[in-house]
Image (tube, rainbow, N blue to C red):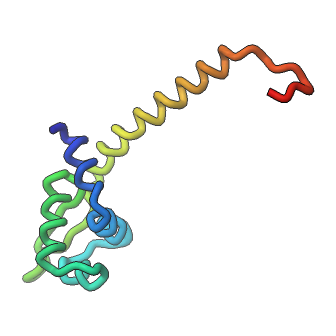
Amino acid sequence: MTAYGIALSAIGDPTRRAILEHLAEHPAAVVDLAAMLPVSRPAVSQHLKVLKEAGLVRDMPVGTRRVYSLDPAGLAGLRDYLERFWNTALHSFKQRVEQQPPQEEGSDD
């Protein structure tokens, strides 16, 4: 599976998306994330492991805890991947519109 596929698979889970949304606001430790989510600390840790392996979050030790934050490089790569679809769709739409004959005024089409 490609890096993009791994990242897309990782964000396919609603709990992992919720974790990303929380981390977008500020870095947090597992215990802080678990307090905001309807899952256990071990479950949050497993979700963070998946997100980290997908390159979407990173962690750093702070005392006895690990604090997680978004990984800008991983998110940028995912954004670039998704943006290609958007750009392709816009280009296709532009081509289609430019190929259409102009409509006459008063036409209901």
Name the residue at 7% across, 82% down: 64
Q: Is residue 39 above or below residue 104?
A: below
Name the residue at 70% across, 17% down: 100
Q: Is residue 9 above or below residue 104?
A: below
Of 98 and 61, the residue lying toward us: 98
User: Is 38 left, or right, of 84 in this rendering?
Assistant: left
Quadrant (top left, top right, bottom left, bottom right) of the N terminus: top left
- In which image quadrant can residue 41 be found? bottom left
Measured as percent of width and height from the top left, residue 25 is found at 38, 71
Of 27 and 10, the residue lying toward us: 10
Quadrant (top left, top right, bottom left, bottom right) of the C terminus: top right
Name the residue at 54% across, 30% down: 90
- In which image quadrant can residue 83 be found? top left
Name the residue at 60% across, 24% down: 94
User: Is 78 left, or right, of 107 in this rendering?
Assistant: left
Q: Is residue 69 above or below residue 37?
A: above
Measured as percent of width and height from the top left, residue 4 is found at 25, 41
Measured as percent of width and height from the top left, residue 23 is found at 31, 69
User: Is 100 left, or right, of 31 in this rendering?
Assistant: right
